Image: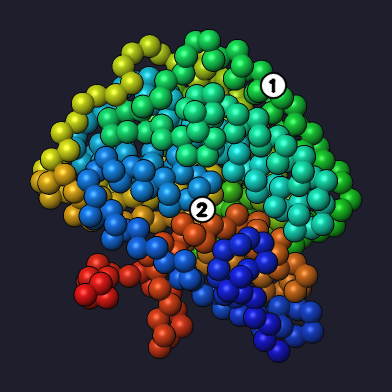
């Protein structure tokens, strides 16, 4: 029989549709339909100037908004042929790693809720407040910090802020160690996560999985090492991998990554160089094009930008990690049970709002595809 899940899916308040074919409780096939949260953002990019688009890029995703604005800003800097100062690179990496910690803590909280462990949900959300407080100390904003600008950053880290930030890091480090130990020993977590939603290394490579999903299947891929940017060439950290490919492995990758991020934030606060925060840039950028990638908490985030000599980009294209890892869901689901759907889905750490910003579902084929600018102009008329 067919079990429809969605358009409201079982882990978040975002609309997607999953069509499961089941035999008893066993899942034998699944079709995934994207495109329910179209917001026309890529078309809007082509109507605003480069500086205004920084804040638009942050609104693609509320959780990883700094990843989007960093990737966008660096792509524009590539097109313009400029480079941000060293201090700005360190501040970008600082904010990015704080964002990675709070994103993974949110993943942990929702994962705990999906398996009925609501005490862990509350603990993770409590500790996530430490990260939000640190973001507020640095930028004044807990969610959208508006840190990036083209040519560098708008926010600085004052010397008197460092002791307070270090104090928060100590609390986070203690909590992360607790969560790592809890995941490995708690009977409820192990029974719900071990040997569930398995993605083999071969399938991860074949289906082009990215981020923690790929690393949990033994694929050692991380743009901070493979294609370094910002201050990552100067930072010491390990690329975390697991080999089992199940929900437990994906969780352990994220938990251990938080420990590495805490170390990196400490290193940045100790070694951040003095100097300017940004360099001037002429927004009338000559015709050019560039691609920039960053390692978001969910994996590879890609921006393509094409300029045309004006202050408004001709084209901005965004590919999110959810889009890249979504094909991996099918082998993770098939062979499992209906009861495992929520936690298997959330093990991907999906973000459909940023994934669907310019996709639609074709009425004839039922498949999702990207909306072209020509179609958007025709519909607007």
Which colour scheme appears in the figure? rainbow
Q: Residue at x 25, y 72 (%)?
A: 380
Quadrant, the N terminus: bottom right
* Visible residue check, residue 206: no
In the image, 81: left or right of 144? left
Image location of residue 331, percent across then percent down: 62, 69
Where residue 376 appears, x then y in whole percent?
A: 27, 70
Q: Is residue 159 left or right of residue 263?
A: left
* Residue 270 sits above or below residue 283 on the image: above
Is 46 left or right of 118, judged from the image as shown?
Answer: left
Find the residue positioned furthest to the right: 187
Place residue 150 in its image quadrant.
Answer: top left
Name the residue carrying label 1. Answer: 170
Q: Name the disc covering residue 143, or none.
A: none
Q: x%, y% of residue 31?
A: 56, 78
**Residue 282 vertical position relative to residue 62 in the rendered view, above or below:** above
Q: Image point 49% across, 10% down: which residue?
A: 159
Task: State the residue position of label 2.
Answer: 210
The number of callouts visible is 2
Using the image as rendered, state which of residue 151 and residue 245 is in the foreground: 151
Q: Secondary structure at mark 1?
A: helix
Quarter residue 81 falls in: top left
């Amino acid at each position: 029989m067919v079990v429809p899940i969605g358009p409201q899916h079982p882990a978040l308040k975002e609309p997607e549709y999953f069509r499961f074919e089941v035999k008893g409780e066993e899942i034998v096939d699944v079709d995934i339909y994207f495109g329910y949260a179209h917001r026309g953002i890529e078309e809007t990019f082509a109507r605003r100037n480069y500086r205004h688009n920084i804040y638009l890029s942050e609104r693609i995703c509320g959780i990883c908004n700094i990843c989007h604005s960093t990737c966008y800003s660096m792509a524009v800097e590539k097109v313009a042929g400029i480079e941000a100062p060293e201090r700005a690179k360190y501040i970008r990496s600082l904010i990015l790693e704080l964002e990675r910690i709070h994103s993974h803590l949110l993943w942990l909280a929702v994962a705990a809720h999906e398996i009925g462990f609501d005490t862990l949900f509350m603990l993770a959300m409590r500790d996530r407040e430490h990260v939000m407080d640190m973001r507020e100390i640095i930028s004044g904003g807990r969610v959208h910090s508006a840190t990036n600008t083209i040519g560098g950053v708008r926010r600085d880290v004052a010397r008197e802020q460092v002791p307070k930030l270090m104090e928060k890091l100590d609390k986070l480090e203690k909590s992360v160690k607790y969560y790592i130990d809890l995941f490995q020993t708690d009977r409820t977590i192990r029974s719900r996560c071990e040997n569930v939603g398995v993605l083999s290394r071969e399938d991860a490579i074949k289906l082009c999985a990215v981020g923690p999903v790929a690393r949990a299947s033994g694929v050692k891929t991380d743009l901070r090492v493979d294609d370094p940017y910002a201050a990552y060439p100067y930072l010491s950290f390990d690329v975390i991998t697991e080999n089992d490919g199940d929900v437990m492995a994906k969780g352990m990758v994220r938990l251990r990554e938080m420990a590495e991020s805490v170390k990196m934030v400490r290193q940045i606060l100790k070694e951040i160089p003095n100097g300017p925060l940004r360099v001037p840039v002429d927004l009338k950028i000559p015709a050019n094009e560039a691609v920039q990638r960053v390692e978001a908490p969910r994996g590879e985030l890609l921006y393509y930008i094409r300029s045309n000599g004006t202050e408004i980009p001709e084209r901005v294209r965004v590919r999110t990690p959810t889009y890249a890892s979504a094909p991996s869901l099918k082998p993770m689901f098939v062979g499992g049970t209906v009861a495992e759907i929520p936690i298997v889905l959330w093990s991907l750490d999906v973000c459909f709002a940023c994934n669907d910003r310019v996709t639609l579902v074709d009425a004839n084929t039922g498949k999702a595809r990207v909306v072209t600018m020509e179609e958007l102009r025709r519909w607007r008329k």
